[in-house]
Amino acid sequence: MAGGGGSTKRPPEAEKENLERWLLTYSDMITLLMLFFVVLYSMSTINPKKFEDLSQILTTIFAGGRIEIFESKAMSSGEGIQDNPGYFPIAKSKTGKKEDIFKQTVSVLRPELQSRTVRVELNEEGVVITLASDTYFGPGSPKIVEAAIPILRDVSGVLKSLSNYVRVEGHTDTQPPSPQNVETNYPYRSNWELSAQRSINVLRVLESFEVPSQRLSAVAYGDVRPIEKNDTPEGRAYNRRVDIVIVQD
């Protein structure tokens, strides 16, 4: 038996294991090099659409928006990144949910709500901004009064921050056009024509404030969708309106 001061030799198997550990580091380095060259190859062809989409995503993120990343069809099929313009899918805007839109709209239009020149409500379709006809138009006229333009500018600011479609709906009460106006070549011979022209005129103002045209549409309902009874002046005043519907996607 060796003395207490003698050294103990390691088993041969342990020495062999220590000598082979360098293979792990080497394999990691080879893997990283392979990935590096794959990335270089994927960037060899620049797709302008891809970089434009990426720019929009980054802009939304840095502005505090929310991006929902999902696997595109081309990614799952194994197409090349540089040939696939849909590689960076654009998500809905950060205020795409109607509850968020409602809160934002109420916040922006608070002065108009307090002065009762607009009403904002939430329904199954989305958010409805109601413009009281007597504030925006003269009696029996589709022409928007000058004092209403700043209010529509504020409404446009809300719409431009969203990606939702917007439907402008014209409504009237049940009072027929004045016979005197008809006899003087008044062009709106029924409430259909009057409500249609009012919705179109509001749409044109929104468009002039740079709300994207492809998201806008105009609808005429005449007197067939009242929200109050037409047997009182107050009820008819509520029914003479233009609704701007921010449609829930």
Image: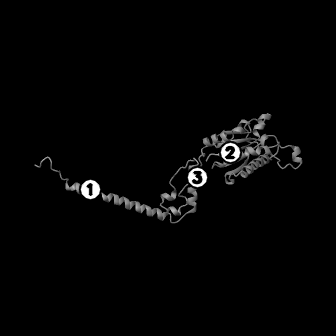
Depth check, front residue: 175 or 47: 47
Residue depicted at 87% across the width and 47% down the height:
182
- Say if mark 3 contacts mark 1, CB within 8 Å: no
Query: Where is residue 158 drawn, in percent x and y?
Result: 67, 45
Residue type for callout 3: Thr
- Does residue 169 appear in the picture of this structure? no
Label 2 or label 1, whichever lies nearer to me, is 1
x then y, percent, for residue 64: 57, 47
Q: In terms of sequence position, does the residue under pointer 2 or pointer 3 come before the other?
A: 3
Residue drawn at the location 58% of the way across and 54% of the way down: 56
Observer-side mark, 2 or 3, equals: 3
Q: Secondary structure at mark 3?
A: helix
Question: Mark 3 sits on what residue?
Answer: 59
**Residue pictured at 70% horizontal, 45% vertical:** 155
Which colour assignment does the render follow?
A: one colour
Q: What secondary structure is marked by label 2?
A: strand
Image point 72% across, 52% down: which residue? Answer: 207
**In the orientation shown, which residue stands out farthest toward the front?**
5
Q: Which label lies toward us, 3 or 1?
A: 1
* Alpha carbon separation for disc pair 2 and 1: 72 Å
Q: Picture coordinates of residue 123 (x, y %)?
A: 64, 40
Residue 155 is at least partly visible in this image: yes
Distance from Cα at disc 3 to Cα at disc 1: 51 Å
Q: Is residue 104 above or below residue 75?
A: above
Q: Which residue is mark 1?
A: 18
Residue that badge 2 annotates? 245
Name the secondary structure under disc 1: helix
| Mark 2 burial class by Cα count in 10 Å: few <14, some 14-19, many 20+ | many
Left or right? Give the position of 162 relative to 146: left
Q: Report the Cα–Cα distance between label 2 and label 3.
A: 27 Å
* Picture disc at residue 66: none
Q: Nearer the viewer, residue 171 or 61?
A: 61
